[in-house]
Image (cartoon, helix red, strand yellow):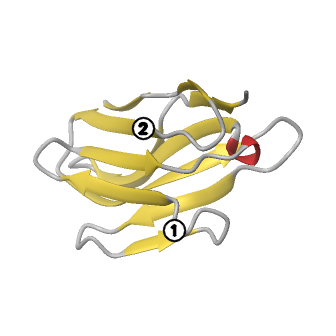
Amino acid sequence: QVQLVESGGGLVQPGGSLRLSCAASGNIFSIYTMGWYRQVPGKQRELVATITRGDTTNYADSVKGRFTISRDNAKKTVYLQMNSLKPEDTAVYYCKADINNWHQRSDYWGQGTQVTVSS
């Protein structure tokens, strides 16, 4: 069984920073692309950033220059450093990972962590 567990969300003032972490655990053979997505009530979940196993990154235009995604393959963890946060960054943030669990390759999602940007 594979699990993704996020941490690091919370309340921050505009202009502040937060660092999200997402650790994968369980029966894992290999982890491919990892990423962060976010969702606000009434809207579709949207991509924030992704990172391949070779560290190629991709960002939504709305976060370029402010957010940085990184990963530690030994720890099976992906991070999202969020700087210069804006109220419109408020959302539930989810991590996703493309994982081979020795039987098949599938996308797994974390449970989500709330990020609120407000004064």
Q: Total label count? A: 2
Q: Which mark is residue 20?
A: 2
Question: Can you name the residue that lies furthest to the top here?
Answer: 10
Q: Amino acid at mark 2?
A: Leu
Foreground residue among 99 and 90: 90
At 79% from the left edge and 50% from the top edge, which residue is drawn? 44
Observer able to see residue 87:
yes
Q: Is residue 83 above or below residue 9?
A: below
Q: Which residue is mark 1?
A: 65
Q: Amino acid at mark 1?
A: Gly
Query: The residue tagged with tag 2: helix, strand or loop?
Result: strand
Q: Crowding at label 2, few (<14), some or many (≥20) Cα neighbours within 10 Å?
A: many
Observer able to see residue 104:
no
x, y percentage for residue 13?
63, 31
At 72% from the left edge and 30% from the top edge, which residue is drawn? 118
x, y percentage for residue 49?
50, 61
Q: Crowding at label 1, few (<14), some or many (≥20) Cα neighbours within 10 Å?
A: few
Q: Which mark is residue 36?
A: none
Q: Quadrant of residue 4?
A: top left
x, y percentage for residue 65?
51, 68
Q: Quadrant of the C terminus?
A: top right
> Real-space Cα distance between discs 2 and 1?
17 Å
x, y percentage for residue 20?
42, 38
At 31% from the left edge and 30% from the top edge, which residue is drawn? 1
At 45% from the left edge and 55% from the top edge, which residue is drawn? 35
Q: Is residue 79 left or right of residue 45?
A: left
Q: Is residue 49 left or right of residue 5?
A: right
Q: Nearer the viewer, mark 2 or mark 1?
A: 1
